[in-house]
Amino acid sequence: MGKNIFVSYKYADSQVQDLNIYETVEDFFGNTLRKKVTTTARHYVDKIDELLEDGDHIFKGEDDGEDMSTLKDATIGSKLGDKIFYSSVTIVLISKGMKEAYSAEQDQWIPWEISYSLKEQSRDGGRSNTNAVLAVVLPDILGSYDYYIIDNSCPYCKCRTLKTDFLFQILWDNMFNIKKPVFTDCQNHIGSKPYQGYSSFIHSVKWTDFHSNPNKYIDIAVAIRQNIADYELTKTVK
């Protein structure tokens, strides 16, 4: 059975690995030319669409750069409610330039999209549950994920480190938020030890891993959602 998937992303972020995309254009003399296109996070959404199974349907998030600072909460809710209400899974693309440094989080689309994905909504006599949410991390222009994910950060237990302070607050708050965490017994860590299992309601995966087996990671997010009572969720934009 197909899934309805909402994708949250910073459409104009070009701090991502080049996908070698070209478009056909005509010059002044009518000659057909191939023009290199600057890859943005939006192009990775197209790749996700290609990867999904028949029957899966994508609802796209931000796509036009609309200025949110002039919008009222009710207007934002109406715009997002229509897109998110009929979805059951949200994929948020983590990219190096996903945050606008000089804009408040309340004035950017991604935090609101995550908020509405996590909320239960009532519309047109129906009711939707909290979405499963999966964070797919895009490589930067050098093909690196180190701006957010450090693999094998401990030489003994081979754990990974997530730089959650890089994220929007609502994403950060919904990671490592399991109510009863289980830790490793690695003695190489001062202070808190690494978590075991799915300790975050919003699970993170590298693009390369997601690309090789998207259904595996979507199913992980859905399984976490089925155990939603085990997590302390934050659903509002701060």
Image: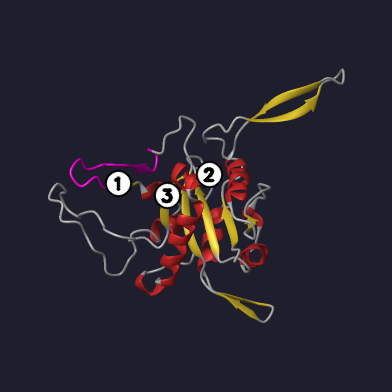
158 part of magenta stretch: yes
Q: Determine the secondary structure under disc 1.
A: loop
Q: Name the residue under label 1.
A: 160
Q: Say which quarter of the image contains residue 110.
A: bottom right
Going by the numbered disc 3, the residue's amino acid type is: Val
The tag on residue 205 is: 3
Q: Say which quarter of the image contains residue 109.
A: bottom right
Would residue 149 be found to the left or right of residue 84 on screen? left
Q: Determine the secondary structure under disc 3.
A: strand
State the image coordinates of residue 168 (x, y, percent, origin top left).
46, 52
Q: Does 94 sit above or below residue 80? A: above
Report crowding for label 1: few under 14, some 14 to 19, many 20 or more residues within 10 A (C-alpha): some
Q: Which label's residue is closer to the chain start, 3 or 2?
A: 2
Instruction: Name which residue lies at 67% across and 66% down.
Output: 82
Q: Mark 2 points at which residue?
A: 100
Evaluate whether residue 238 shows in this view. no
Q: Does 33 sit above or below residue 18? A: above
Report crowding for label 3: few under 14, some 14 to 19, many 20 or more residues within 10 A (C-alpha): some
Q: Nearer the viewer, residue 53 or 160?
A: 53
Q: Which label's residue is closer to the chain start, 1 or 2?
A: 2
Magenta range: 146-160
Q: Nearer the viewer, residue 88 or 104?
A: 88
Image quarter in which the N terminus is found:
bottom right
Going by the numbered disc 1, the residue's amino acid type is: Arg
Q: Does 162 sit above or below residue 83? A: above
Would residue 90 be found to the left or right of residue 83 on screen? left
121 part of magenta stretch: no
The tag on residue 59 is: none
Going by the numbered disc 2, the residue's amino acid type is: Glu
* Inter-mark Cα distance, 3 to 1: 11 Å
Query: What colour scheme does the image use?
Result: secondary structure
